[in-house]
């Protein structure tokens, strides 16, 4: 008789249980959530069958929030409390955003927190209080998460969230913070063009060099990838994180102002005309001309005929602005146009015929548009999420992405010194040694920036940190080694070590725009009427989910390599740790679960190293690392 | 059994499983790099324990560094010399042949001039010439490092210093192209 396997309640899961993971395309204009179902990537719809969630959030006086269609419907009615295109403000100060005169929002400039410090992320004053772009984005993510959990019937293990390839550290960090605020475990931040390449590449089993041209609502990316035998290798990324379909709308809006000799408009009229402009742009994709009509709040009647030709003329330099990053990316990849085998078009704005024509002309070939440009990023992200969640173990494709913008530090004279050059494959790290310039100096400050320009003032200030506690010595005697590590999400962390005494100081770079844990807690509290209870409950649930994943991962590792790589006592210690965690897991003692998790993590360090070493040996055809050592 | 530990001092040639020579088989390097990343990349450990995720990032970082070093002829030459205990003294040794320095200065001025005039064809020509000169220097370095009869680490260090000049010039040309684009 076969024995039934009985697992402790709430502890182990079935070995091949499908973990619920999704890909989220958090777009400027629309957002989507997708998942892999029965081996096929699909976009999840809402109860009404709609796939795209407009990235629009409306704050109401009673503190409630509308997201998506209902918010979009109210945007002309309530323009200053209805936030569209919040992605454009992520990780940005007010001065980065440029001309805000035509904007219906009430921006709040967050001044710098110290001398030489960059100002904080811009915020928006609404009827429900001041909101940061991170909070606005979190509302969109919460909605998508709810949609996914309703559709899949369970709690998500995690999500892959896409970002423009050309997003800098501050913008990436802001995106991750938004996910955290929405209660989403981020499996990976994935670059949008890379996500699209996965969807295309796996679909067509392509080989060779491909360019992904991604013109979204507010951002432009170009990525050059080499696809070969299941490896997606990004060779170069470039772009403009402040150029997108919105700018085409804005051109039409300005044209309407000029045609009708209008004075600066109130927020209501601004939003009305921008909405009309967008509709006109979409109309001109299929038609030679379109009529734009509107009645402004003062009774003025707008009635203009816009032809394709005039529209193309007024947006010509926007289109050509996308060609500069293209040339740069090709040059960085050391490739010519002729070597590009295919061009993939991504993003709703690539539907515009003048964009397609310009890209076709540049590459001398017709771009690929067989996957829906609105969906392709989410579809690719879902495929990656499925793999990262551990659902497809037999899969052997690999993604190698790059850092889009160089990282550097400030040196004398306000100049930057590059530390990690752009297009370095991630994860990557660089170390640098500093010394003191004064006798007895015990502290020094390092200013980390991102960008390609020579002057610090022209780059993005990511963080300023101080190294304290350097042992007092004569000038030049202390040796401080600073290591800059960029992880697979493209996020930077910095650690420093004083070499002569081995004192280590670890600093995770919190960009001037990043949120501290306290801020996240505060925002969570504010966003919820029953905050304290809910948060405790959620923290417990999250910790339990994490603990179960850990137990499962350790069990799998033991099944695979436990016998080969562990001495009996080591194995027993790990099993004790698992049992200890299993014992506290079903209860509600959060600190006890946390302690047991960290204990088990500690116990598995050596085992993890051996397993990794085995992987390396396998990769090099059965040779053990020790055989290679001199 | 002693646990093999993540060892950042391990040599890149060993890590990527190719012979420690200047002339390498590029396809083999690529193949081994991809095979290694397929085993250690953080994406393969996203659902594993914290310890494994952290280790995966260290390994993948290390493998990337090794690959970047060995893939570039200049970095590879410098690294090979370092393994053999020769410092290339790129920051300190300024005793370059005078004719070489003169030529470098002339070329740098030519790049600046072409950039000022936004002359893409002139920049193209300068770039082609630079590429051809770089190739000859690389061939020379191959002899000095790999060929028993011509083995000369001191001369090789000089060639690496020259190649560093070439690389700086290439960066300037690239920056000039960027300027013209803007």
Image (tube, rainbow, N blue to C red):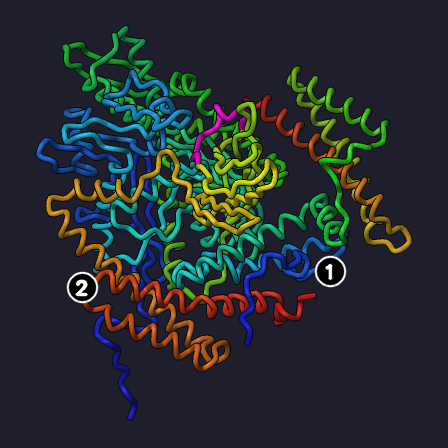
Label 1 sits on residue? B19
- Tell me the chain of label 1: B
Residue A530 horizontal/vertical position (percent): 11, 47
Residue A576 horizontal/vertical position (percent): 34, 76
Check the picture and name the quadrant holding the N terminus of chain B: bottom right
Query: Residue A456 vs residue A331: left or right?
Result: left
* Label 1 secondary element: loop
Where are the magenta residues, as a range? A453-465
Asked if residue B51 lies in the magenta stretch, the reply is no
The reply to the same-chain question for discs 1 and 2 is: no
- Looking at the rendered structure, the number of numbered marks drawn on it comes to 2
Answer few, some or many: residues within 10 Å of disc 2's Cα (few below 14, many 20 plus, some between 14 and 19): some
Label 2 sits on residue? A588
Q: Nearer the viewer, residue A250 or B24?
A: B24
Depth-wise, is mark 1 or mark 2 nearer the camera? 2
Q: Nearer the viewer, residue A486 or A210?
A: A486
Q: Residue at x 69, y 53 (%)?
A: B26
Separation of marks 1 and 2 at Cα, in angstroms:
57 Å
Residue B16 horizontal/vertical position (percent): 64, 59
Quarter occupied by residue A265: top left
Q: Residue at x 59, y 22 (%)?
A: B179
* Label 2 secondary element: loop
Asked if residue A456 lies in the magenta stretch, the reply is yes
Answer few, some or many: residues within 10 Å of disc 1's Cα (few below 14, many 20 plus, some between 14 and 19): few
């Amino acid at each position: 008789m076969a024995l039934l396997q009985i697992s402790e309640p709430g502890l182990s899961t079935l070995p091949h249980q499908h973990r619920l993971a999704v890909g989220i395309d958090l777009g400027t204009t629309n957002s989507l959530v997708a998942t892999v179902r029965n081996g096929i990537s699909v976009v999840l719809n809402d109860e009404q069958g709609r796939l795209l969630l407009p990235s629009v959030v409306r704050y109401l006086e009673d503190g409630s929030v509308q997201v998506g269609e209902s918010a979009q419907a109210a945007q002309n009615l309530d323009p200053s409390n209805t936030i569209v295109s919040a992605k454009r403000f992520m990780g940005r100060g007010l001065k980065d955003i440029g001309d805000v005169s035509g904007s219906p929002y009430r921006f709040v400039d967050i001044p710098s927190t110290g001398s030489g410090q960059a100002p904080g992320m811009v915020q928006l004053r609404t009827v429900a209080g001041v909101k940061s772009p991170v909070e606005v984005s979190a509302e969109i993510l919460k909605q998508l998460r709810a949609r996914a959990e309703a559709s899949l019937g369970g709690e998500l293990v995690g999500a892959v969230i896409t970002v423009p390839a050309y997003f800098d550290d501050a913008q990436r960090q802001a995106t991750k913070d938004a996910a955290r605020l929405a209660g989403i475990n981020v499996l990976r931040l994935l670059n949008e063009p890379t996500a699209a390449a996965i969807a295309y590449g796996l679909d067509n089993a392509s080989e060779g060099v491909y360019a992904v041209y991604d013109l979204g609502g507010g951002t432009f990316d170009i990525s050059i990838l080499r696809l070969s035998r299941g490896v997606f290798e990004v060779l170069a990324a470039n772009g403009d994180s402040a150029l997108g379909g919105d700018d085409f709308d804005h051109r039409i809006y300005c044209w309407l102002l000029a045609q009708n000799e209008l004075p600066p408009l109130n927020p209501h009229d601004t939003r009305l005309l921008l909405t009309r402009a967008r509709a006109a742009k979409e109309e001109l994709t299929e038609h030679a001309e379109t009529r734009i009509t509107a009645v402004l709040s003062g009774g003025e009647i707008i009635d203009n005929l816009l032809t394709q030709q005039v529209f193309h003329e007024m947006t010509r330099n926007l289109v050509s602005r996308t060609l500069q990053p293209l040339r740069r990316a090709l040059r960085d990849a050391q490739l010519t146009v002729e070597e590009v085998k295919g061009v993939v078009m991504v993003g709703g704005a690539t539907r515009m015929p003048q964009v397609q024509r310009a890209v076709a002309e540049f590459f001398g070939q017709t771009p690929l548009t067989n996957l829906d440009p609105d969906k392709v990023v989410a579809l690719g992200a879902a495929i990656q999420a499925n793999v990262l969640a551990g659902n497809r173990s037999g899969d052997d494709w690999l993604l190698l992405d790059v850092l889009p913008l160089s990282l550097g530090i400030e040196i004398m004279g306000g100049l930057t010194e590059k530390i990690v050059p752009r297009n370095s494959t991630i994860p990557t790290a660089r170390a640098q040694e500093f010394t003191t310039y004064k006798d007895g100096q015990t502290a020094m400050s390092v200013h980390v920036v991102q960008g390609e320009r020579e002057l610090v003032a022209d780059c993005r200030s990511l963080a300023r940190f101080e190294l304290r506690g350097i042992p007092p010595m004569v000038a030049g005697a202390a040796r401080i080694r600073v290591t800059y590590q960029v992880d697979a999400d493209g996020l930077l962390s910095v650690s420093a070590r004083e070499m002569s005494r081995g004192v280590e100081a670890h600093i995770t770079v919190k960009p001037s725009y990043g949120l501290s844990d306290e801020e996240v807690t505060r925002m969570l509290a504010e966003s919820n009427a029953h905050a304290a209870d809910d948060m405790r409950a959620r923290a417990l649930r999250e910790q339990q989910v994490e603990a179960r994943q850990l137990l499962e991962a350790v069990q799998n590792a033991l099944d695979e390599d436990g016998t080969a790589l562990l001495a009996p006592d080591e194995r027993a210690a790990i099993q004790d740790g698992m049992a200890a965690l299993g014992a506290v897991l079903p209860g509600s003692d959060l600190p006890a679960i946390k302690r047991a998790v960290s204990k088990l993590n500690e116990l598995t360090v050596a085992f993890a190293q051996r397993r990794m070493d085995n992987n390396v040996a396998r990769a090099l055809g059965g040779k053990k690392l020790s055989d290679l050592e001199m | 059994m002693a646990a093999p530990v993540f060892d950042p001092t391990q040599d890149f040639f060993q890590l990527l499983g190719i012979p420690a020579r200047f002339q390498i088989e590029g396809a083999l390097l690529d193949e081994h790099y991809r095979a290694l990343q397929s085993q250690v990349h953080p994406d393969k450990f996203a659902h594993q324990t914290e310890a494994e995720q952290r280790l995966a990032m260290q390994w993948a970082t290390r493998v990337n560094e090794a690959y970047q070093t060995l893939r570039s002829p200049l970095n590879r030459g410098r690294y090979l010399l370092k393994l053999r205990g020769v410092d290339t003294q790129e920051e300190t040794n300024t005793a370059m042949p005078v004719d070489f320095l003169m030529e470098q200065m002339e070329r740098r001025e030519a790049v600046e001039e072409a950039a000022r005039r936004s002359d893409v064809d002139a920049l193209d020509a300068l770039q082609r010439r630079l590429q051809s000169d770089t190739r000859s220097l690389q061939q020379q370095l191959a002899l000095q490092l790999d060929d028993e009869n011509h083995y000369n680490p001191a001369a090789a260090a000089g060639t690496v210093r020259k190649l560093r000049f070439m690389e700086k010039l290439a960066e300037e040309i690239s920056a000039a192209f960027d300027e013209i684009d803007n």
